[in-house]
Image (cartoon, helix red, strand yellow):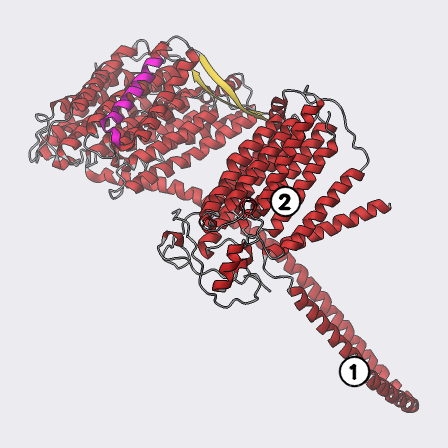
Amino acid sequence: MAIPLTAYLIVAAVLFAIGVYAVMAQRSAVMILMGIEVLLNAVGLNIVAFWRYVGPGDYSAQIFLIIIVTVGAVEMGIGLAIMMLLYRNRQSVQVDMFKDLNG
Amino acid sequence: MTLSAWAQWSAFIIFAIISIAGALGMATTMSMFRSGIFLMGSFFGVAGLFILLLADLLALLQVMMYIGGMLVMILFMVMFSHDPGGSMMAGMKMSPIENFFSLGIPPEEMEEMEEMEEMDMSGMSMTTPVKMHAAVIGLITGIGLVALLLLRPVWPVVSTLPAPDSARKVGTLLMSKYMMAFEGAGLLILIGIFGAVLMARAGRFAEKPGRDARVAHEDPPAPIDRKPLAPDHPPVGEVPEMEVPEAHGD
Amino acid sequence: MNGYLLITVPAAPMIAAILILAGGRRLGNAAGITAVLANAVSLVSLLFLYGAFPLSIAADWGISGGYRLTAGLWLDRLSFFTAVFVSAVGFFVNLYAVGYMAEDDGKSRFFAEMAFFTGAMLTLVLAGSFIILFAAWEWVGLASFLLIGFWYRKTGVPAAAKNAFLITRLGDTGFFIGWLWVLGLTGTTDISVFLETVKAGGIGYGILILLALLFFLGAVGKSAQLPLSAWLPPAMAGPSPVSALIHSATMVAAGVYLLLRLYPLYHSAPLVRDIIFWIGGGTALFAALSATVQADLKRVLAWSTISQLGEMIFAIGLGAPLAAFFHLVVHGVFKAALFLAAGAVEHAAGVRELARLGGLSRKLPVAAGTFAVAGLALAGVPPFSGFFSEDKILADAVARGTGTGIYLLVIVFLAGVYISRAGAAAFGSWPGAPAPPAEKPERSMQAAMIGLAVFAAGVGWALSGTVKHLVPFESGPHLELGWKIAASLIALSGIAFGVFRVYRSGPVPALGGGWKVLERGLNGVTRGAGELFQGAAVAADYIERGLDAGALIVGRVFGMAAGAVNSVEYGVDTGAIAMKRGFGLAAAACDILDIGFDRAARTLARATVLAADGSDRLERSGFSRGGDRLAMLLGMGGSGLRRLQTGRLYLYTLGLFVWGFLVVGFGFIVWVVM
């Protein structure tokens, strides 16, 4: 218990901020997905830190994280499949090339 | 955990630095493949933090699922659809910092190239035009959250340690109380697999233009528009000598 | 240990099926040998289990509400001997099929399907729970479909397979409803629990009768009794091993087996037994008559199967399950032998029509001998096996009444006629026989035929004394010697008649061609049954539509009532107008006063018009312009907002996070202030 809870939460917060930056500033769709992964990581770290320090008897937090990770994996798989299709059709996955929904 | 406080603190600091540095590197480096590797480093850091938090099952899950699954997917996708920062950058001379970190600042040689051939090099950047806004928002979010954390009153921290066989308890819980979530996640994975496979198949009507994967062909792909912010894009000039990645067929 | 052995019995052929399927075409002859070995493994496991009954393995598959769904196998004396019979016949037929399918490309598919069928049939026999029984019932139907349609490229074959599947399905609905009802009554799907409840009288009489009828419907479908018999003759389009195994010995016997298994139910429902008696007897007679006019060798055997099954069902209807079981086993053996011989003829000579066969006894001696032995067994000539089983049925028939006994003897005569006609036409040298060339059959085919012929000859005599110890039914009455002699003589005369007819006039219909209409009639009955079901479904649909229309009519009635009220109101209005006109005359007098008021009113009106004009001008200038400007503002706002839809993902994510940030910031401020 030498490390206070807040330290973990700060690390998670910084990771979250970096993830936010990556999602917005990256140009390639794959990089945006990587940013989303960092966001999920930050949230997971938060949950587990709280579980450890506030309620270590109830393991629901770990299950929650397992489900989060699973859903993240599925979302990533489908996102990459969509990108694959995009790449086949447009030969590019830079998100600023796709302005078809303009107006 | 019976480690001394110093050991805990040093482990924490090391893992925290690894995660944050990895994430930062992922977000800023110019080579896509390298950002994938940075991401892997960040995952390892977070896994280490999980172990410090006595959630060993989750640390293993983190390594296996994120690194072993998602990262591999991402790397495959990166190699499939981009120049992974190899051939284009290899010929350019960059200072070691730029080589490692590639902040997106075009190196000097690039500027020369730009002047000579009057190419618009902004297309080579890895970032969208809202980079500054994004950086600002990211910074504000980070600072805001950290400030909130430090100003928050004390959390109801308990000092009991979790049981050492957390994996067994998690498994029991998963199979009894959260069975619906478990089955639902399984169903979701199944549907996701169906959807992903269905989408990524080679098109049945291969003769229709635009339907087949042109990377399998000899001719280069259609020229990529290089003026990102123009409302309507006039046809652009030459595509620089980029090596199209090899046909990763159907 | 015994439990594992019991599970091996149906599992071995299933595993063999999966292995053969996995092996694919490369296996060649090994596929057939695997199937034969699987049968042998089942048989040996069963022999090891001898004496270990009653043995039951069950597991709870699901408990929900008050219902307990079990799944399990039950080995008692009935299922033991039936399973031995099934795997033994299967062994011989598979051995035969190794030779029969030697030149066929699809033989691994064939043997995989045969092994699957054997596994399914053994599961059916050994089933201890209705779920397993029904599942195996359906699997057996599926395997039959696959195997009948094995040569699916030939014309008529897919239709025959489809027909077989669908017509038996009609009967299966009865079975399905029946066991679901049992589940509702007893709360569990265990068969032994159901039988105990029936024996203890725990189910009401009316429900008993309905259940018995429903299960009998399933048996009718599977065992090709009237009215669902039309699928069996066309099913002869499949290979002969299929006809031998499925459509003579095992699958069609599944219906009879179901009735035997659930016999306590029928024991307590004499009314249903009467119905069974009439249906079985009727089928037996009509099918036997149809068999005498058939022109195709295998069709004779097919109708003969229907007739013999009819006899078994007839026996159950008489209340003689022991006789029915005995005849089941005996019939399975000799009918399989007959089909194997017919298959050898077809394999060797290439034709099946009786008119084009003849004189094959010298070229195919093994086949001829097998056909002769099995044919004599079918006819019921002592000492071959058919004599003993028909003896038992006859005993029960006579006990019911002499007329019934004579009816049975007629069927015995007809059996002799048709089988000897078929045998003589195929093997004997009758005048005008084309005597086609024939090659010798394979070694394995011969071995299987000899094996089954031996069984056909001997099993009756061997089991006649001991069969009552084998199955838990009481033995029937004893038959007097006079009847026995009469039966043998009639069988022999039937045979003689058939042979005589063939030698004198060739393979013409033995008793006149007039009975051909029976076949059409029987087919028509089956079609009628199918159309009855369809009619019931359509009628239900019409009823529903009628209810809908009824609802519509009610709505319209209300509408009309409202219209009527409307017209009443109109009438009242007209009356009011008339009244007003009446008063108008009086009002005319007041008009003069009115004129004065009029002028004042007109001035007022003019003033109002001027005011209205003025306000209109105001409106047009100010308000409308204001409205226009508002619209324009909105439009510009819209197109301004439209610029938000840039279509660029990064701007959207930017907006998302900015908005989130603002909300969180706002919340933070609120929290700090409070």
Residue holding disc 2: A19
Residue C631 falls in which quadrant of the image?
A: bottom right
Chain containing mark 2: A
In the rendered structure, which amino acid carries the disc numbered 2? Gly
- Residue lying at 28% horizontally and 23% vertically, measured from the top left: C34
- Residue lying at 25% horizontally and 21% vertically, measured from the top left: C92
Crowding at dot 1, Cα within 10 Å, few <14 / some 14-19 / many 20+, comes out as: few
The secondary structure type at the circle numbered 2 is helix
In the rendered structure, which amino acid carries the disc numbered 1? Ser
Residue C327, visible in the rendered structure: no
Could you say where residue C662 lies in the image, as x and y percent from the top left? Answer: 74, 52
Q: Nearer the viewer, residue C121 or C305?
A: C121
Q: Is residue C450 above or below residue C615?
A: above
Is residue C45 within the magenta segment?
A: yes
Give the residues drawn in magenta, as a range: C26-46
Q: Quadrant of the C terminus of chain C?
A: top right
Is residue C316 within the magenta segment?
A: no
Spot the residue most to the left: C431
Could you say where residue C596 lies in the image, as x and y percent from the top left? Answer: 92, 91
Q: Please give the label number shown on residue B103.
A: none
**Does residue B183 appear left or right of residue C300 in this picture?**
right
- Residue lying at 67% horizontally and 44% vertically, measured from the top left: A17
**Does residue C103 appear left or right of residue B42 in this picture?**
left
Residue holding disc 1: C621
